[in-house]
Image (cartoon, rainbow, N blue to C red):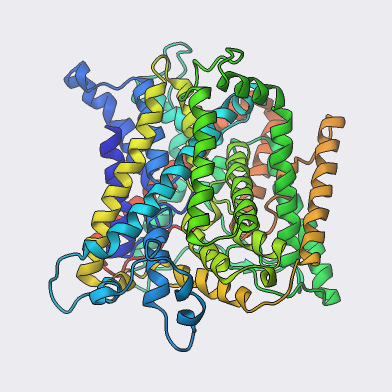
Amino acid sequence: MGGVLVAWINFWTTYAEYVVHASRMNISHYPVALFVSYFILAVSVPLLRRFGDRLALSSADLAVVLAMGFVGAMVPTSGLMGFLLGIIATPFYFANAENRWGEYFHPHIPDWVAPRDTGKALTYFFDGPPGEIPIPWEVWLVPMAWWLVLTAAVVYASLAIAVILRKPWSEHERLVYPLVAASEELIRLGSGGDTSTRRPTFWRERLFWVGMAMPLSVMVWNFATFFSPLIPYINYAGRWMTPLRGFPRLRTRINSFTLGFAYLANLEVLLSLWVFYLIVGTEVYAFNRLGFKITGTEDSWSQPHAASGWQSFGGLTVFVLWGLFVAREHLSRVFRAALGRREADDSDEILSYQAAVWGLLVSVILIFFWLLAAGMSVPMIVLIVFGTFIVFVGIGRIVSEAGLVYVRAPLTPQVFSIYALGPGNLSPASMTMSAFTYVFFSQGKGLFATPLIHAARLGEFVSGRRRRMALAVVAAIAIGILVCTVVTFSWGYERGAYNFNDYPFSSGSKHAFTVTIKKMQDTRTVDIERLLFYGIGAVVMGLLVFLRYRFPRWPLHPVGFTIPLTYATLNSVFAVFLAWMLKFIVMRIGGATLYNRTRPLCFGLIVGYALGVGLSFLGDYVWFFGDGHGVHSW
């Protein structure tokens, strides 16, 4: 069942974006394609059970299926495969005399890293062939094989980290995991209810239907406006606004998906997210009024103001490292267990600690030598791997604690490593390979780390044989890669990948090389200004952590300082503020009792929004095929 779900999600997501040109179905950490499909599955299972127990699924079965869905949904389009195929094909297809890519990049790209335009293989892939031709697999086979080797190392390292950190996060610190908390309702529905508590499912709650009706009715109404300009459009997407000239803008978007999941997070976390937007925004406002600006080139995925981006990344670094320090006793037991000493019980993990630790070590070594063979220098490898680790673990922690479904790191590992070492100190080969490593960037979402962290948490629903879940999530990635490879090449060599009008095959892949070439032309050495703000952010985060642990009533959670002005935050902060305000009022009036009674309302908001996106896709497929509407975004 899980394999079928993963195959369907990958096909649906790819088809919706590349062919129908509808919404981007996996841009969030809880992909809409997954949520809609899993919701339909959870609703259908109790009905199918009437035809025999063989069609029934237990809560453990449903948890495994969801874990596979979480991980497999990160493969298509803006996850792995869109950027992988788009980026490795870009430097030779888009090269021309004006951008000088042939001069800057081509001499430093090994044959096994990127395909060449042999026999116009890349030209036909992007532009479409003049007639029906077979897919030239021989051009793609070697680069694809080597990139999948690197992908396997990244996946296993992410899985190992997820397993090692599950116990301290879930059992010791008791993080909320709002994405899993919302999914529990679907698991309970699909498995026939929670018999241990006799708690009624959301299906019987009136507030659920009220919550579902609100976003669903608005989205259905708005879809009707596509047929006639006489029908007024309800602008629930909001608009960009700037409180003051020079102050970072925010979007007044009331996203039910964001609001519903955020409502499940702790109040102090929600408070910190919008308060730090105001605090760091005031800092940027002061810099803009004073005319202070750090020169150089970031990239479009980092925070737009360089000083705040480096400051936030310094905070994110300490945030992650402090989390490891808090878990030091557990980590010590894990590493001793890897040496054969049975000091840590790993029977409740989806992977043994020995397999996790030694697999993590082998994966890191493989990543190191892969990048070294591709031409990247040792210092560059060390920093880019360190930066990637901070992003992967940091984003996973933020989603697990804050319930934000749209999260982006404040800085990319590529920008961090290049300016920390100094672009003038780096070889052209190192800079060239840094552009290729955007393959694993995935819009700053942490690629497979976040879904694997949630898969490890879902393992708690499985009693016995949890090790099989590790095989299941790895199989989900393999299935997703297979489906995406087949359909992307089939449609690419049929209609042209550039005609997909999708970010990884157009501006996204080109941007990775455009910003890199600007850095190659930058002769500065170590960037002291950026490192200064990185250090300031680290110190501020250290102070916030101290205040949180020293004073129990300290109101601000450090997590808000890590992502105050990212593009995803600017789109979500208004909805987060609404979620905080509603939950604050509910808790003041009725406490935890009233909060638990209102949870079905927020779950209804999530379901209504997701179903609205799904119905909009169906409408685009029927009436606007090839010219669909992007109703789902940040």
Q: Position of residue 430 (x, y in %)?
A: 57, 65
Q: Is residue 296 above or below residue 268?
A: below
Residue found at the far bottom of this picture: 97
Residue at the spot 45% in from the left edge and 80% down from the top edge: 102
* Visible residue check, residue 227: no
Q: Give the answer, above or below, for where 182 lies relative to 317.
A: above
Q: Does residue 532 sit above or below 129 in this rendering?
A: above
Left or right: 50 in relation to 294 = left
Residue 310 seen in the figure: yes
Q: Nearer the viewer, residue 101 or 309?
A: 101
Taking depth in this image into account, of 493 and 278 the one nearest to the observer is: 493
Could you tell me residue 342's position as x and y percent? 57, 12
In depth, the one of 281 and 487 nearer the eye is: 487
Q: Residue furthest left?
A: 132
Classify residue 308 by image quadrant.
bottom right
Q: Position of residue 497 (x, y in %)?
A: 30, 69
Q: How many numbered callouts?
A: 0
Indicate left or right for 244 with 17 as reference: right
Q: In the figure, residue 608 lies in which quadrant?
A: top left
Query: The N terminus is located in which quarter?
Result: top left
- Across and down, in percent, residue 573 comes to 64, 54
The picture quadrant where one finds residue 245 is bottom right
Residue in view at x 38 percent, y 68 percent: 505
Viewer-closest of 187 and 146: 146
